[in-house]
Image (tube, rainbow, N blue to C red):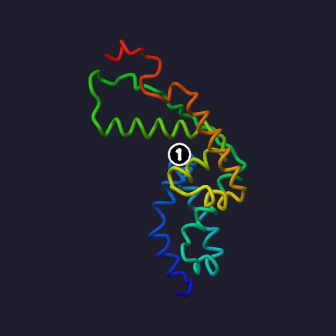
Amino acid sequence: MEPSEETFAEFVAAAGLPLLRTARLLTGDWHLGQDLVQVTLAKVYDRWARAGRYDAPIGYAHKVMVTTYCTWRRRRWHHELPHAAVPDAAGGSVEPAAEAVAATDLLERALLSLPRRQRAVLVLRYYQDLTVEQTAEILGCPNGTVTSLAARALTRLRARPDLWPGAGTTEAEVR
C-alpha cells in the first residue's frame, strides 16, 4: 500500500496507545508522554513517504521516540513530589486495584530514578520485550552497551530497599 495521509491516520489509530504507554514509562508523566508522542508522530509524518513502506512502521516510530526522548535537552521542574504513603489511608487490606496502582507508581518512580539511557534500555528490553539486538538498533549503539546499561540499571534498582516490599523487616515481623 502506498503511504498517504489515510494510511498515516490508520497507523496513528493503531499505534497511538502503545506509543503513549511507552512514552509514559520513559518520561514518568502522562502529559510529558503525550508531548513526546506528539513530537514523535510529527517526525514520523514528515518521513511517512519512506516510513509508511516499512513492514512494521511501529518499530520506526519507537526508534524515533527513544531517540527524541534521549536527546531532549530541557528539564522541567515538577511542583508535585510523590510520597510513598498516603497520610489519610485507612488501615487494613487494600483493594487489588489500589495495589496495582501502588505497584505501577512504584515502578514509575523507580524508572525515574535512573539516567535516561538506562531507563530507555529497561523500557525497551522488559516492557517492549525487545531483544538486545533490537534495542541496540533503536538506540544506535553496540549490543554490549545495551547489556551493560541494563546491568547497571538493574544493579541500581536492586540496591534500593524502598523498592522491595517487606525490605528491612525480619522474618519474625512478617509472621
Q: Residue visible at 45% across and 69% down? A: 14
Where 143 falls versus 15 (above or below)? above
Q: Nearer the viewer, residue 139 or 29?
A: 139
Q: Residue at x 48, y 54 (%)?
A: 21
In the rendered image, the vertical position of residue 85 relative to residue 146, given as above or below: above
Please give left or right for residue 10 compared with residue 53 in the image. Answer: left
Residue 106's x, y, as percent? Answer: 47, 35
Image coordinates for residue 25, horizontal then vertical, percent: 53, 48
**What amino acid is at disc 1?**
Asp
Q: Is residue 120 above or below residue 61?
A: above
Q: Quadrant of the C terminus?
A: top left
Horizontal side of 152 relative to 91 (left or right) equals: right
Where residue 48 appears, as percent x and y from the top left, is 61, 77
Q: Residue 118 location, x and y as percent?
A: 64, 44
The crowding category of the residue bearing disc 1, from other C-alpha atoms within 10 Å (few below 14, some 14 to 19, many at least 20), is: some
**Residue sitting at 53 percent across and 36 percent down?**
109
Horizontal arrangement in the rendering, residue 90 relative to residue 142 (left or right): left
Residue of label 1: 29
Q: Residue furthest top?
A: 172
Number of numbered discs: 1
